[in-house]
């Protein structure tokens, strides 16, 4: 049986104000071409790069979050190659002295080792027009780009996607990158080979152009099959770079693999070697204080998950789902702390309220979010208003049918739930007298169902209840109504 051996290389654009070596705006989404450019990022002769300290600090924070060893000394190197999107004819990157090495990220039950994380500059972008001409946009050239490389510890498409997703979440918690794959803010390259378990690794292929998690998964599955078939026929896998063609749903050969010596790496002469940590005699502004950065790390997804499990009595799967999106996790926490401050008796019902909030978050609210493509952090439902809705449901002030429509209205308008309920007269009817009146009317309008129920048909009761809900727009308290119906029909 052949097994897949997979290593990932993930590039992420860092969220800094300016580019890596000049003070142009770091805004690769800028739609007007070539506005954020200057002689430094255009590589004009005689210009000098000046390192953006914030970018270095962000990479170190990511390294710390992934249990990496942080270098005491690090340097930049020139990676030389020619391509029209590379104005200098070389990319400033890091070769043998990266900022971070030897980390680990646990995904499910498995530790995936991280070889290194280094800092480099992004390239410009080629735009191919309708007439066959190629244009170059340098807004992206010089944007800080972090590259993470894993050991070949990954064994399947699902594991690879699991790693990439977990890493994306960490970047978002650290506020280091938007890390949106569709926008090119996070880009995965997959290295994959096949071998018999226990035998040496086979020849690997590198796959580029993967701009979604689905593409990563599909490309690995495709390549696993392609390489297995080749090897099964006694043929060889060629070491090469392949691209993912999303239309053909196939990987296609791009070029034979280059190796490090093709790039003629050499130390960047215009940047001094970086000393990390506090060193005697360093000017204050040059200090990159690793221990201070360590102390500044926020609560990370794994820690939040563990805390949520304890504090709200959540199952592991439930907690993982909740923390896997930073916006959702903080919305939930904010709503819960709002609820706790509303009423004293709520503190004793904390776990119950948490459950209720999660249920609405994962079903009705999630559906609205998915339908409209609005991220949690941008939707109009505030945690305060959501907390109020959960409190109303908890106190049985509204039925779940009404809650659903109130939530939809909140989502569309940003109004608070009590206003909506008042405006539309949606408060739950639990008053026995009022319910009895309505139920009498339902029974006399549906004599057949009433007789059927008396004859032992339980479905008839559900039917009558349904009629009642329709006539009250879902406001009738279901438990109280069932009792009254049974009383009248016994
Ligand atoms: P290269 O020198 O070709 O760039 P590296 O050794 O630097 O190769 O590794 C690049 C990536 O390929 C890493 O993520 C590494 O884990 C992965 N890798 C290395 N060898 C293999 C292999 N035989 N099969 C699959 N992936 C591999
Ligand atoms: Mg690179």
Image (cartoon, rainbow, N blue to C red):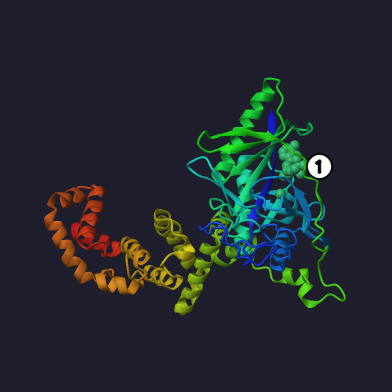
Residue farthest along the right direction in this orientation: 280
Under circle 1, the secondary element is helix
> In the rendered view, does 54 fall on the left or right side of 172?
right
Residue drawn 33% across the image and 74% down it: 418
Ligand 1 is in which quadrant of the figure? top right
Q: Position of residue 448 (x, y in %)?
A: 14, 49
Q: Can you see residue 394?
A: yes
Residue drawn 52% across the image and 33% down it: 248
Q: Toward the viewer: 472 or 27?
A: 27
> In the rendered view, does 380 fall on the left or right side of 480?
right
Residue drawn 13% across the image and 61% down it: 441
Residue drawn 24% across the image and 59% down it: 469
Q: Quadrant of residue 368?
A: bottom left
Q: Position of residue 317 (x, y in %)?
A: 56, 54
Q: Considering the image in quadrants, where does the N terminus appear? A: top right
Q: Toward the viewer: 103 or 420?
A: 103
Residue denoted by label 1:
261
Q: Position of residue 379 (x, y in %)?
A: 43, 64
Q: Can you see residue 490?
A: no
């Amino acid at each position: 049986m052949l097994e897949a051996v997979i290593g990932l290389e993930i590039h992420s654009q860092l969220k800094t104000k300016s580019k890596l070596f000049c003070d142009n705006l770091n805004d690769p989404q800028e739609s007007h071409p070539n506005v954020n450019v200057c002689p430094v990022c255009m590589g004009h002769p005689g210009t000098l790069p000046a390192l953006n300290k914030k970018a270095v600090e962000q990479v170190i924070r990511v390294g710390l979050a992934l249990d990496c060893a942080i270098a005491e000394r690090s340097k930049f190197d020139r990676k030389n190659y020619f391509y029209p999107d590379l104005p200098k004819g070389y990319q400033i990157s890091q070769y043998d002295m990266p900022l971070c090495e030897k980390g680990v990220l646990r995904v499910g039950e498995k530790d995936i080792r991280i070889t290194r994380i280094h800092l480099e500059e992004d390239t410009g972008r080629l735009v191919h027009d309708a007439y066959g001409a190629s244009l170059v946009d340098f807004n992206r050239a010089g944007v800080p780009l972090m590259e993470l490389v894993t050991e070949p510890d990954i064994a399947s498409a699902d594991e690879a996607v699991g790693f990439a997703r977990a890493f994306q979440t960490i970047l978002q918690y650290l506020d280091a990158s938007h890390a949106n794959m569709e926008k090119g803010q996070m880009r995965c390259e997959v290295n994959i080979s096949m071998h018999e378990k226990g035998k040496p690794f086979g020849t690997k292929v590198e796959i580029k152009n993967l701009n979604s998690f689905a593409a990563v998964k599909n490309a690995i599955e495709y390549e696993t099959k392609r390489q297995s078939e080749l090897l099964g026929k006694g043929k060889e896998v060629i070491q090469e770079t392949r691209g993912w063609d999303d239309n053909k749903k196939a990987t296609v050969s791009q070029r034979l693999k280059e190796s490090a010596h093709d790039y003629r790496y050499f130390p960047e002469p215009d940047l001094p070697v970086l000393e990390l940590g506090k060193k005697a005699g360093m000017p204050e502004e040059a200090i990159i204080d690793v221990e201070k950065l360590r102390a500044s790390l926020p609560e990370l997804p794994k820690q939040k998950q563990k805390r949520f499990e304890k504090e709200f009595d959540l199952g592991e799967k439930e907690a993982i789902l909740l923390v896997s999106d930073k916006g959702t996790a903080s919305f939930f926490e904010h709503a819960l702390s709002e609820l706790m401050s509303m009423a004293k008796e709520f503190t004793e019902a904390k776990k119950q309220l948490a459950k209720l909030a999660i249920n609405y978050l994962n079903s009705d609210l999630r559906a609205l979010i998915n339908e409209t493509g609005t991220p949690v952090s941008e939707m109009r439902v505030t945690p305060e208003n959501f907390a109020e809705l959960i409190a109303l449901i908890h106190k049985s002030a509204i039925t779940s049918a009404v809650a659903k429509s109130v939530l939809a209205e909140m989502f569309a308008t940003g109004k608070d739930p009590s206003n909506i309920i008042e405006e539309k007269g949606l408060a739950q009817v639990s008053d026995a007298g009022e319910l009895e009146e309505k139920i009498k009317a339902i029974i006399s309008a549906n004599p057949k169902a009433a007789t059927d129920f008396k004859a032992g048909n339980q479905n008839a009761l559900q039917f009558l209840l349904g009629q009642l809900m329709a006539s009250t727009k879902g406001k009738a308290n279901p438990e109280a109504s069932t009792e009254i119906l049974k009383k009248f029909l016994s």
